[in-house]
């Protein structure tokens, strides 16, 4: 299955609890951390929810 790399570029400070939980669900909790996940519709939806705080590195 294809994978996608995501990098956290924004801080979760002053964000809602669900956005923070989405970052944790993606395996991100610190600035500039990179997480590699399977490219599924669920992961794409999570990325879309916090798109202002993450960047797709390669995919």
Image: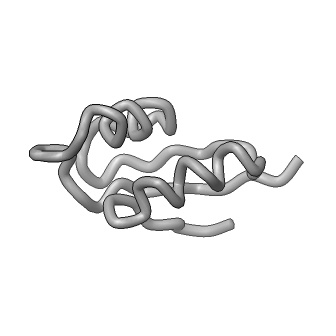
* Residue 24: x %, y % from top left: 40, 31
Residue furthest to the right: 1
| Residue nearest the observer in this picture, 14 or 28 | 14
| Residue at point 51%, 44% (across, down) | 35
Q: Is residue 34 left or right of residue 42?
A: left
Across and down, in percent, residue 47 comes to 53, 55
Name the residue rendered at 34%, 66% in the picture.
52
Relative side of 46 to 34, left or right = right
Coloration mode: one colour
Residue 17 appears left or right of 43: left
* Residue reaching furthest to the left: 14
Q: In the image, what residue occupies the spot 83% across and 53% down?
A: 2
User: The C terminus appears in which quarter of the rendering?
Assistant: bottom right
**Please, is residue 29 above or below residue 31 in the view?**
above
Left or right, residue 6 beside residue 37: left
Tell me how many marks there are: 0
On the image, the x and y values in percent for residue 48 come to 52, 60
Q: Nearer the viewer, residue 23 or 34?
A: 23
In-front residue for pair 7/44:
44
Q: Please, is residue 17 above or below residue 49 in the view?
A: above
Residue 17 appears at what percent x and percent y?
A: 27, 32
Which residue sits at x=39%, y=40%?
A: 23
């Amino acid at each position: 299955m294809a994978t996608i790399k995501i990098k956290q570029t924004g801080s979760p400070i002053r964000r809602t609890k669900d956005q923070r939980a989405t970052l944790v669900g993606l395996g991100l909790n610190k600035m500039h951390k990179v997480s590699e996940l399977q490219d599924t519709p669920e992961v794409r939806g999570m990325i879309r929810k916090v798109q202002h705080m993450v960047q797709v590195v390669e995919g």
